[in-house]
Image: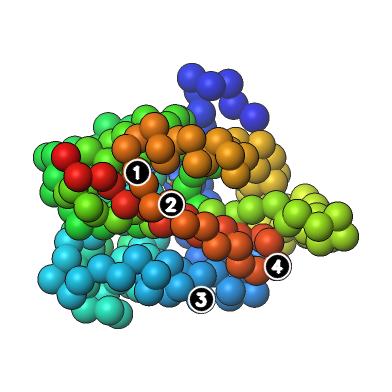
């Protein structure tokens, strides 16, 4: 695991290396369920047709496609240039960091983000930035992995995530270290209570959480308070 100050360059280099096989490994790892989780988040966020969305840490653009399917305009931002080079549509994406968003205050109606909380160098700072670029009353939606609560499910999940995923990811991407980092990165996930505190501290209210995939994934939706 990288030291705190080295996390951002470490994560950028890792995603640059695995960008070419990222989509395939994602589909294999989640049995394609990740696409349904994305559609669910987009649906639950209830963004107006004429709304403007930022997909933060957009990677290869799966959420951009999900927004496009709804006929909603979305822009993407990501740290890794190689991930962005594979994003479709490639127009409307920009390289940058979630901790210092290159947008004016109150620009977006909604901000989505998938599987990035563990990867940010500082999620608390990112949430403040998200609140800043959202219009008052704007909505944030986050999709992340989770650890199942029941003992049996947690053990099976630990085995799968800790052994099978690094094996598949390592074989397909030829980058074993990247897919060893993946299960380890769960250590960066805030607890349920810490998630609540972080959203509240960044000025969000009406927080809702859904657990999906037998506890392997979670969705958060919250609203930015009025200015
Ligand atoms: C696991 S991938 C998820 C990609 C995409 N959101 C998806 O759902 O498939 C995590 C992404 O977060 C990006 N990322 C990591 N740290 C970031 C940061 N500080 N700011 C912006 N993007 C970041 C990585 O480059 C990578 O593309």
How far is disc 1 from disc 2 in space, using C-alphas? 7 Å
Viewer-nearest residue: 58 or 178: 58
Taking the spot 45% from the left edge, 73% from the top edge, the residue there is: 40
Ligand 1 lies under 8 Å from the Cβ of mark 1: no
| Residue in view at x 67 percent, y 60 percent | 216
Is there any visible trace of residue 96 in the rendered image?
A: no
Residue 19 placed where, x, y %?
47, 55
Q: Is 51 left or right of 65, judged from the image as shown?
A: left
Residue at image point 20% right, 45% down: 226
For the residues carrying marks 2 and 4, which lies nearer the camera in this image? 2
Callout count = 4
Separation of residues labelled 3 and 1 (CA atoms): 26 Å
Question: Closest to the observer: 39 or 46?
Answer: 46
Q: Of circles 4 and 3, which is in front?
A: 4
Q: Is mark 4 within 8 Å of ligand 1?
A: no
For label 3, count other residues whose C-alpha is less than 10 Å away and answer few (under 14), some (14-19) or many (20+). few
Q: Which residue is mark 1?
A: 204
């Amino acid at each position: 695991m990288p030291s705190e100050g080295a996390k951002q360059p470490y994560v950028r280099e890792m995603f640059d290396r695995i960008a070419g096989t990222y989509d395939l490994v994602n589909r294999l790892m989640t049995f394609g369920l990740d696409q349904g989780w994305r559609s669910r988040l987009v649906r639950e966020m209830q963004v107006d047709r004429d709304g403007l969305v930022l997909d933060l840490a957009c990677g290869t653009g799966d959420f951009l496609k999900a927004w496009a399917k709804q006929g909603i305009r979305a822009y993407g931002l990501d740290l890794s240039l190689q991930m962005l080079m594979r994003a479709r549509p490639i127009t409307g994406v920009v390289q940058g960091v979630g901790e210092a968003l290159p947008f004016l205050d109150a620009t977006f109606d909604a901000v989505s983000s998938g599987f990035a909380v563990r990867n940010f160098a500082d999620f608390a700072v990112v949430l403040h930035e998200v609140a800043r670029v959202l219009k008052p009353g704007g909505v944030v939606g986050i999709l992340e992995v989770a650890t199942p609560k029941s003992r049996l499910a947690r053990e099976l999940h630990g085995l799968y995530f800790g052994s099978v995923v690094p094996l598949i990811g390592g074989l397909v991407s030829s980058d074993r270290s990247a897919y060893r980092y993946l299960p380890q990165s769960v250590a960066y996930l805030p607890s349920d209570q810490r998630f609540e505190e972080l959203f509240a501290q960044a000025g969000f209210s009406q927080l809702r959480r859904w657990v999906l995939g037998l506890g392997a994934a979670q969705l958060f939706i919250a609203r930015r308070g009025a200015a």
